Image (cartoon, rainbow, N blue to C red):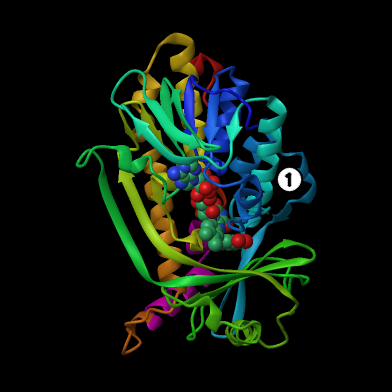
Amino acid sequence: MSAVDVSRTQVGIVGAGPAGLVLGHLLYLQGIESVILEGRDREYVEGRVRAGVLEQGTVDLLIEIGVGERLRREGLVHHGVELRFAGKGHRIPFDELTGGRGITIYGQQEVVKDLIAARIESGAPLLFGVEDVSPVGIESDSPLLRFRHEGQERELRCEVVAGCDGFHGVCRDAVPDGALRFRERVYPFAWLGILAEVEPSSDELIYCHHERGFALHSMRSPHLTRLYLQCEPDEAIESWTDERIWDELSARFASEGWSLKQGPIIEKGVTPMRSFVAEPMQYGRLFLAGDAVHIVPATGAKGLNLAVADVRVLADALARWFSRGDDSLLERYSEACLPRVWRAQHFAWWMTSMLHRMPDDRDGFMARLQLAQLEYVCSSRAAATSLAENYVALTDVPRATADQIV
Ligand code: FAD
Ligand code: DHB
């Protein structure tokens, strides 16, 4: 797409992660022009292994906008998860507790591949390998995105800028000091995640609490297992040989009559654990979405789902503004998103606090509280229902009616 001349558009989107790509596609379907600027190359973006759990609302949206064909074919539908602690597993039956709901396991990079293919097929501009993106004049009516592409300095005049450039992006920093309020917690641990070429050891996800630390069993296909283990926040990945990883995972998941299947490890990475929210999610003509404006610790599996929920609200608000000149939905973008963001923050923090080994817990007080909580969740229908309904359907966005949009 490098030869496209892009100097003017309605919506300048920074970032081709799930937020930027879904937003671009929703706008395309409404006849609104956008240009997506992505810092990395296509291969990198499509190969980045991250999330895996999609809520039904996310799946429904992807199908509705025409990018869900492979997801429907290859996605693994799950109706429960296992909580494992004190060496025993306890199933939380989502379907029974939430009126038939479940989740779908489908890798984020597969979602991203499907969205990039749709973008390219639509002919709408998506530039990879863009450097030094800088939003200028976001408080004016015609903000600008300055950037460099293929060695040339470029300017893209926009009516609106969508900052979908993740936690380390540049858009949030373009807002003047003091205009946003930040709230943050950094956890004293991280996740070491691997992808292994081996059949999953269980049909469902296993969230495992153990005195050696948290572990999570997930999957990507009948032949690919995704596993995570709690590690130090500054963990040197080189110190984790494949053998050490398998030994540690096997020790944490140990349960009578169950064993962890092992295979070649094809991907390894360390993910920090952080809670972060910037408020409001907008300033002038800049609208922030997804990880650019909020981060949740991965334990609740909410980040990607929240990113999609944000841009769904933003796309409807932009459609109304471009079609009618009515900015009432746009003005209320933050207000519409933040309650969901904070509910997800609470759930992710709660799951994280219940399941991870707390490093400063010298007398084991926290560990006893965690076990008490886990036992309660697994023995009380009310507590299990609370976990289930947050896990399966927290980021559902009520559909705007056509009348609200246009
Ligand atoms: P990103 O995916 O970060 O995309 C931002 C894009 O912007 C990137 O492509 C980046 O290259 C680009 N960019 C950055 N800076 C610039 C710049 N200056 N100029 C141009 N482009 C730029 N979420 C779930 O819902 N379920 C899960 O199961 C789950 N598991 C996870 C497991 C792990 C190990 C991790 C790390 C995350 C997990 N998440 C999960 C979270 C999820 O991956 C993120 O919330 C999601 O990627 C957010 O999407 P986004 O589009 O907002 O940001
Ligand atoms: C996966 C990631 C998560 O953060 C989670 O809570 C569950 C599953 C995954 O990558 O499959």
Q: Residue at x 64, y 85 (%)?
A: 250
Residue 4 or residue 32, whichever sits in front: 4
Residue 112, compared with residue 199, is above or below; it is above
Q: Tell me the quarter of the picture where residue 119 sits.
A: top right
Residue 253 in picture, x, y percent from top left: 61, 81
Left or right of 190 on screen, residue 173: left
Based on the picture, tell me whether residue 134 belongs to the magenta stretch: no
Residue 218 or residue 148, whichever sits in front: 148
**Which stretch is magenta?**
367-387
Q: Does the magenta stretch mainly form a helix, a strand or a loop?
A: helix
Q: Tell me the quarter of the picture where residue 85 sits.
A: bottom right
**Residue located beneath label 1 in the image:** 71
Q: Residue at x 35, y 80 (%)?
A: 366
Q: Residue at x 44, y 48 (%)?
A: 291
Residue 192 in picture, x, y percent from top left: 54, 72
Left or right of 18 on screen, residue 339: left
List the single residue furthest toward the top: 324
List the single residue furthest toward the front: 151
List the single residue furthest toward the left: 178
Based on the picture, tell me whether residue 378 belongs to the magenta stretch: yes
Quadrant where the N terminus sits is top right
